[in-house]
Amino acid sequence: MMPEETKNTNSRRFAKEILKGLVIANPVFVLVLGLCPTLAVTVSIDNALGMSAGVIFVLLGSNLIISMIRKITPQLARIPVYIVVIATFVTILSLVFEAYLPPLHESLGIYLPLIVVNCIILGRAEAFASKNTILLSIADAIGIGVGFALSMIIVSFFREILGTGKLTVFGKTLFSIPVLSSDPLAFFIMPPGAFLVLGLLLALFRWLGVLNNE
């Protein structure tokens, strides 16, 4: 294969891995992974953005390192090694949030350190980064990370709008719905509301998937 053809093939594969995580293998709406933080922290767009940024950072860092050391990692010790790598990036993330974004750090609470055992990150390390090149592992991390972020933002958007009657991002109100602002449906910012919104969105993605298959 000519160098130009190889370059084009690699570019297409890179783009394919990114796009895969957005829809085809969306971690929340299709693979149904990472539901714990999705349900717990999506009471506001701020929380969704903070958690999403954290997951993307950890996913990128861990995929990169695990792909680099995949050939020298003993088969029997791979899971402990992956957890140590992931925990290192989560510790860095937690310290940065605590130092520069203390309100967000406090709001995310225990769910920030629990990124260590997030099944999305550990799953991508085991299923993809440990078997593929550095470039493809980065593409996988970007696709899955952005897909997770979009899922979090969509869920929090509906919960915040319905539960408070307005959309506020880092203290700035983008818009409000007068009817809901005066009488918000507080149910949607409570745990049962999270289950309802997520369930309806899962059903929507399933329905769209069925239509696409037909």
Image (spheres, rainbow, N blue to C red):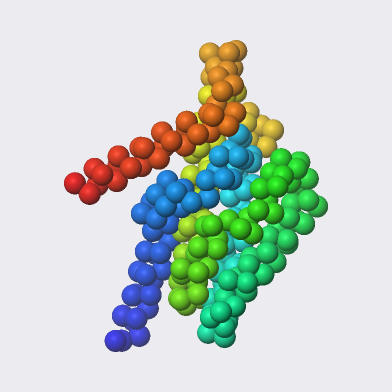
Q: Is residue 96 left or right of residue 11?
A: right
Q: Farthest residue to the left: give it.
A: 214
The correct choice, above or below, for 212 with respect to 132 in the image is above
Residue at 46 percent across and 52 percent down: it is 27
Residue situated in front as seen by the camera: 208 or 125: 125
The correct choice, above or below, for 157 with respect to 210 in the image is above
Residue at 78 percent across and 45 percent down: it is 102
Residue situated in front as seen by the camera: 116 or 145: 116
Query: Which percent across, then down, holds residue 197?
Result: 47, 32
Query: Which percent across, then down, holds residue 85?
Result: 65, 70
Picture quarter containing residue 96? bottom right
Labels in figure, total: 0
Work out whether residue 140 can be spotted: yes
Query: Which percent across, then down, holds residue 61?
Result: 61, 67
Q: Is residue 12 left or right of residue 91?
A: left
Residue at 69 percent across and 54 percent down: it is 113
Work out whether residue 160 can be spotted: no
